[in-house]
Image: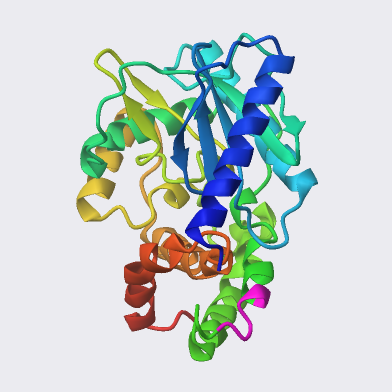
């Protein structure tokens, strides 16, 4: 496991890399500070009105090519939403909208949002925003992959957890592999999904809890963090939000011409999200807070009925 001193040193290296890259791009980042450090180190490049996001913890099996693909897709989708008039955290107009690699870190640069309010994470209250996002994303013209957030992620993560009883007991790992063996093939392609769930449409979705990745200010609400944007059923964005939230989503979705929530698909997506949480323990050596952070979710999954 990485120590806190090692994590702090990693954060400092990411900060220095972001500042150096910003300087090469003509930005004044003389007052830069780290404002967030979990999977990514987020650097406020003050006094420039720009924020750098620097991934520092990535899943087993992911490499530079996949990381760059995620970053380029996120930049493209955010720019498209902004062009449509949606309030979205956008690529900084002061630098090219493309990933920059510096000192081993691949980073992207975003326009800073000022006046951010403390997050209340009112999932039910945010469901109309999620429905609106889905309604807009239906028209996204760019190429998107099917379930990119789980592509290659599960198997590589489970392989990394072999023999790590300190992170996940062997019985849990065996169960996770067995459930993924049932569910994984359904997400391998749109055709496979369609055969398993006839009549359930798929579309561009946020991919990573859009109700959580909303930034509020006194004057507007902004969508953010489209790193895992891809084609999926809308239920992928609604997993584990609860009955009230799903009802709120459906009420807003109906007005916008979106289909209703399919309970069978929602249940399957919730189990895949469970397996994502289990699999993310493979990143705990690089991010020890994950062990405690996902413990309650893993316990709920452990107590549930085995899928399939």
Is residue 229 in sight in this rendering? no
Assign the N terminus to one quadrant of the image.
bottom right
The reply, left or right, for residue 240 in relation to residue 165 is left
Taking the magenta stretch, the answer to whether it contains residue 168 is no
| Main SS of residues in magenta | loop
Asked which quadrant contains residue 267, the reply is bottom left
Residue name at image x 63 percent, y 69 percent: 157
Q: Quadrant location of residue 129? A: top left
Residue 95, visible in the rendered structure:
yes
Q: Residue at x 65, y 49 (%)?
A: 146
Residue 54 location, x and y as percent?
60, 37
Circle count:
0
Q: Position of residue 297 (x, y in %)?
A: 35, 68
The residue located at (39%, 73%) in the rendering is 298
- Which residue is depicted at the point 49% across and 11% down? 47
Q: Residue 14 versus residue 207: which sits nearer the camera?
A: 14
Q: From the viewer's perspective, is residue 281 above or below residue 175? A: above
The x and y percentages for residue 196 are 57, 65
x then y, percent, for residue 277: 47, 65
Q: Is residue 4 above or below residue 145?
A: below
Q: Which one is nearer the viewer's eye here, 144 or 8?
A: 8
- First to last magenta residue range: 159-164
């Amino acid at each position: 496991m990485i120590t806190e001193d090692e994590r702090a040193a990693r954060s400092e290296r990411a900060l220095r890399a972001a500042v150096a890259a910003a300087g090469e791009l003509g930005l004044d980042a003389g007052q830069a500070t780290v404002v967030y450090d979990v999977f990514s180190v987020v650097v406020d490049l003050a006094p420039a009105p720009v924020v750098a996001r620097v991934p520092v913890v990535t899943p087993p099996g992911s490499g530079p090519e996949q990381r760059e693909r995620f970053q380029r897709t996120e930049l493209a989708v955010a720019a498209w939403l902004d062009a449509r008039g949606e309030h979205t955290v956008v690529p900084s107009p002061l630098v090219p909208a493309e990933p920059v690699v510096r000192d081993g870190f691949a980073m992207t640069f975003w326009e800073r949002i000022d006046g951010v309010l403390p997050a209340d994470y009112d999932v039910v209250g945010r469901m109309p925003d999620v429905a609106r996002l889905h309604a807009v994303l239906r028209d996204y013209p760019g190429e998107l992959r099917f379930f990119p957030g789980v592509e290659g992620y599960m198997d590589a993560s489970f392989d990394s957890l072999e023999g790590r009883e300190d992170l996940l007991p062997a019985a849990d790992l065996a169960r996770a592999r067995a459930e993924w063996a049932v569910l994984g093939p359904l997400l391998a392609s749109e055709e496979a999904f369609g055969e398993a769930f006839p009549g359930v449409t798929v579309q561009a979705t946020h991919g990573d809890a859009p109700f959580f990745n909303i930034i509020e200010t006194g004057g507007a609400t902004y969508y953010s963090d489209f790193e895992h944007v891809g084609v999926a059923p809308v239920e992928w964005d609604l997993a584990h939000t609860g009955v009230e939230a799903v009802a709120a989503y459906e009420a807003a979705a109906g007005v916008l011409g979106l289909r209703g929530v399919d309970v069978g698909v929602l249940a399957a997506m919730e189990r895949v999200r469970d397996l994502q949480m289990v699999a993310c323990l493979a990143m705990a050596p690089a991010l020890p807070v994950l062990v405690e952070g996902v413990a309650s979710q893993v316990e709920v999954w452990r107590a549930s009925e085995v899928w399939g």
